[in-house]
Image (spheres, rainbow, N blue to C red):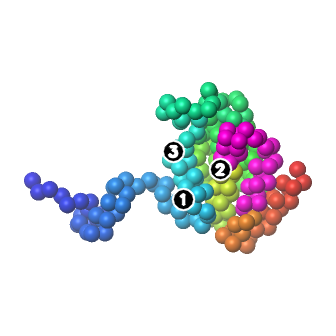
C-alpha cells in the first residue's frame, strides 16, 4: 500500500496548496467560518460571534460542566435569574435578550426573529432580502456583543444596567460602523437611535 502524502484536491490530485490548507486548519474547517469573516467588523466582535456560532462561549453552564471553580455557586442566568445560562438561553431565550432582539426587530422591520445562534447565520440571515443581509449581520453581531458585555459587567463588576442601556449601546455601536453599512440602512439605524433615546 502506498502511503498518501496528504489531502487531495477535489479532482483527486495532491497539491502544495491543498497540503498547506490542511496544515493551517488541521483538515477541519467549520462550515460557519466563511460567514463570519466576510463582513467588516471589529475582530473581537467577529470572534465572539464565531465562537457563539460554534457553541464555544464560556457561559456559566459550560463553565460548570467543565468543573471549573468560579465565583458563582450556580449557573443561573445573571440577566433574568430564571434559567441556566446556556448559549441558547443567554443570547436568544432570556427575557432580557428577547427584548433587545424585539427592539431591533420592530425598528428595522424584520419579519421574524432568529431561533438559535447557528440558525442565525446559516438560515435566518440568508433568508432575508439580499440588501438587508449585511445590515442584519452587523446588527446581530452588535446585539450579541452588547449582551455579552452586560452579562460580564454583572458577573465581574457586580454592575447591572437596564435593558435600555444595552439597546442604546448597541445602536451607538452600529452608528459608529456607518462606513461599513450601506447608505440605504443608515436611515433605519438613525431612526432606531432616536427611538432608543426617547424610551
State which region is magenta. 147-174
Asked if disc 1 and disc 3 are in contact, CB closer than 8 Å, the reply is no
Residue 44, given in percent of the width and then of the height, sits at 58, 57
Q: Position of residue 72 (x, y in %)?
A: 63, 30
Point out the residue furthest to the right here: 198
* Whether residue 79 can be seen here: yes
Residue drawn at x 65%, y 52% as measured from the top left: 145
Which element carries disc 3, helix, strand or loop? loop
User: Closer to the N terminus: mark 3 or mark 2?
Assistant: 3
Q: Residue under label 1, please give it.
A: 36
Q: What is the magenta segment's predominant secondary structure?
A: helix
Looking at the image, residue 138 lies above or below residue 78: below
Residue located 87% across and 55% down the image: 197
Q: Nearer the viewer, residue 162 or 2?
A: 162
Q: How many marks?
A: 3
- Mark 2 lies on a secondary structure that is helix
Alpha-carbon distance for marks 1 and 3? 15 Å
Q: Which residue is mark 2?
A: 144
Q: Is residue 154 magenta?
A: yes
Please, is residue 7 above or below residue 101 in the view? below
Question: Is 52 displayed left or right of 129 in the figure?
Answer: left
Residue 135 position, x and y percent, is 67, 62
Point 66% across, 67% down: residue: 131
State the image coordinates of residue 108 (x, y, percent, origin top left): 76, 57
Mark 1 residue crowding within 10 angstroms, few (<14) / some (14–19) / many (20+): many
Q: CA distance from mark 1 to mark 2?
A: 13 Å
Counting other residues with Cα less than 10 Å from the Cα at mark 2, is it few (<14), some (14-19), or many (20 or more)? many
Residue under pointer 3: 56
For residue 155, side relative to residue 68 (left or right): right
Going from the N terminus, do you reach mark 1 or mark 3 first?
1
- Does residue 140 appear in the picture of this structure? no
Amino acid at each position: 500500500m502506498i502511503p498518501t502524502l496528504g489531502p487531495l484536491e477535489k479532482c483527486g490530485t495532491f497539491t502544495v496548496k491543498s497540503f498547506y490548507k490542511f496544515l493551517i486548519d488541521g483538515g477541519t474547517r467549520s462550515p460557519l467560518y466563511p460567514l463570519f469573516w466576510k463582513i467588516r467588523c471589529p475582530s473581537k466582535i467577529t470572534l465572539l460571534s464565531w465562537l457563539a456560532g460554534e457553541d464555544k462561549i464560556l457561559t456559566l453552564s459550560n463553565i460548570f460542566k467543565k468543573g471549573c471553580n468560579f465565583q458563582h455557586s450556580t449557573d443561573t442566568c445573571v440577566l433574568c435569574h430564571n434559567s441556566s445560562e446556556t448559549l441558547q438561553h443567554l443570547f436568544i431565550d432570556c427575557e432580557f435578550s428577547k427584548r433587545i432582539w424585539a427592539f431591533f426587530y420592530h425598528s428595522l422591520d424584520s419579519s421574524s426573529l432568529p431561533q438559535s445562534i447557528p440558525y442565525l447565520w446559516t438560515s435566518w440571515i440568508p433568508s432575508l432580502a439580499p440588501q438587508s443581509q449585511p445590515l442584519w449581520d452587523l446588527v446581530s453581531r452588535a446585539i450579541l456583543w452588547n449582551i455579552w458585555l452586560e452579562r460580564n459587567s454583572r458577573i465581574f463588576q457586580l454592575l447591572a444596567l437596564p435593558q435600555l442601556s444595552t439597546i442604546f449601546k448597541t445602536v451607538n455601536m452600529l452608528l459608529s460602523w456607518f462606513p461599513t453599512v450601506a447608505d440605504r440602512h443608515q436611515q433605519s439605524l438613525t431612526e432606531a437611535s432616536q427611538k432608543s433615546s426617547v424610551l
